[in-house]
Amino acid sequence: MKGERKIIATTAEKKRVNVIGTLNAQTLKLVTTFAETVNSETLTEHFVRLRRSYPRTRFSTLHIILDQGSYCVSKATQIVAARLGHQTASSSPLFAQP
């Protein structure tokens, strides 16, 4: 009937999956972190996992390219990255602002 609310059955709600990943360009080894949310803290956890995968004895500096997300360019993230021996670089935005 017109104006009457109808309930429509749906499947389970969609849940967002956050994956932080780092790919070694030479060996194609992938280090991943699954997180409920992505922020400076979860990125820090990923950096620690990354350092465990590539010990300083063999890899003194890891070069990481990050996007422009606020958690990537935050001061906290940059401090942790430097302490762990990660050299970070930010990618340029896909669309330049006029």
Image: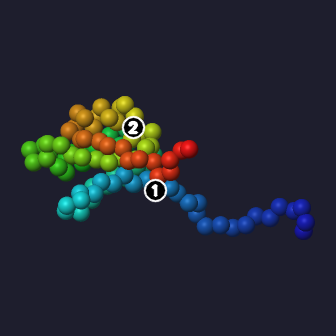
State whether residue 58 appears in this view: yes
Element class at badge 1: loop
**Residue lying farthest to the left in this orientation:** 57
Residue 17 numbered mark, or none: 1
Q: Is residue 28 above or below residue 73?
A: below
For the C terminus, give its image quadrant. top right
Residue 58: % across, % down: 10, 48
| Residue at (41% x, 47% y) in the render | 92
Residue 7 numbered mark, or none: none
Q: Looking at numbered disc 2 in the image, what kind of residue is underneath it?
A: Val
State whether residue 45 appears in this view: no
| Residue at (83% x, 61% y) in the render | 5
For the N terminus, give its image quadrant. bottom right
Q: Is residue 79 above or below residue 91?
A: above
Q: Which residue is mark 2?
A: 73
**Residue lying farthest to the right in this orientation:** 2
Residue 80: % across, % down: 28, 34
In this view, the residue in front, 89 or 29, is 89
Residue 93: % across, % down: 45, 48
In this view, the residue in front, 47 or 25, is 25
| Residue at (23% x, 33% y) in the render | 83
Q: Quadrant of residue 30?
A: bottom left
Q: Quadrant of residue 27?
A: bottom left
- The image's colour scheme reads rainbow
Q: Quadrant of residue 97?
A: top right
Q: Looking at numbered disc 1 in the image, what kind of residue is underneath it?
A: Val
Q: Distance between the Cα atoms at labels 1 and 2?
A: 22 Å
| Residue at (58% x, 63% y) in the render | 12
In this view, the residue in front, 38 or 9, is 38
Element class at badge 2: helix
